[in-house]
Image (cartoon, grey):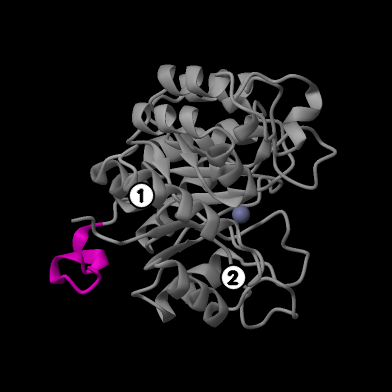
Amino acid sequence: MVTQFRIDIHAHLRPDDAAPSKMPTPEELLLMYEKAGIRRGILLPFISLKSKPGVLTAENARALSERYPDRFFWFTTLDLEENWSREKMMGFLESEKKAGAKGVGEITSKFRFDSPQVEMLFSCCEELDLPMLFHLAADFEDAYGVVDDAGLPQMERMLQRHPRARFVGHAVPFWSEISVLESPEDRKRRIKEKVTEGRLAEIMRQNPNLYCDLSAGSGSNAMMRDREYTVKFLNEFSDRILFGCDITSPTVTFPFQLIAFLDQLLEEDEISEELWERIFFRNAMALFGISEKDLCLEEGSDHV
Ligand SMILES: [Zn+2]
């Protein structure tokens, strides 16, 4: 029987001290989790959006995960715009890891993917074995995110130069590459057409340190646009695909649609129970070093 357990690897919240915004409070998010059968969330702070009200900082994320220890894990993050030396960055990340951070992100800074600051982060995270999650941007006109060109050549070079650095790809310009791009505009929209295998599968095959975040409209759309291709993709990269939501308002519906879609693939034997479990929680456990004990799985309390 499948363990009906889900980890949302991409969660944001509105901290207590923040001005009202549509971002969910912890209580609102947990209510959505209850409806969706999600048992744990990983809180991802933002940095480049810190001037906006209601934005989660690394300190908030840590405090909230300590307040809800059976509900939330947390990532740390940092501002690439600060004047970092490698030594200073290593010191900061090492102490955050000791304090319990499971990874670094969501990095939303407007930098080119091949800039020295991004490379320093890759190098430090490689040494400290801390996974990274970035919001990718198509160009500097996007509101935020680390910018790469069509085909993601800068990301690929970084993965090759830092083969032990584990990177989780996210957002529209990442998922657009699941198919061959028809026009530059494809990097900015959620395409509904069938998939003709694109750069993403090629980069995944050559770089075992690349992981995929299914969160947000970008991830769920990429999964649901071509069921036949999705089944192949999930089976081939079964140990590197991670369920996530990226809920930014209590009214969003895409995580529920994605869950229903993946559950249906299981019901119709398109994916195995083992693969279902990997996508929903086992890959996250392996990547972020979450033990069964951390999840209280061995007590059976979360089995349905
Ligand atoms: Zn996000």
- The image quadrant of residue 96 is bottom left
CB of mark 1 within 8 Å of CB of mark 2? Answer: no
Q: Residue flagged by tag 2: what amino acid is it?
A: Leu
Viewer can see residue 147: yes
The reply to whether the magenta stretch includes residue 227 is no
Residue for badge 1: 284
- Where is residue 104 drawn, in percent x and y? 50, 50
Q: Tell me what residue is drawn at x 49 percent, y 22 percent.
A: 201
The correct choice, above or below, for 169 with respect to 292 in the image is above
Question: Residue 234: where, in percent of width, then height?
Answer: 40, 34
Instruction: Where is residue 14? Give x, y as percent.
Output: 63, 74
Instruction: State the extent of the magenta-drawn residues as a range.
Output: 291-304
Q: Is residue 67 left or right of residue 258?
A: left
Disc 2 target residue: 13
Instruction: Left or right? Give the position of 254 relative to 299.
Output: right
Q: Secondary structure at mark 1?
A: helix
Q: Amino acid at mark 1?
A: Ala
Tell me the quadrant of the picture where the N terminus can be found.
bottom left
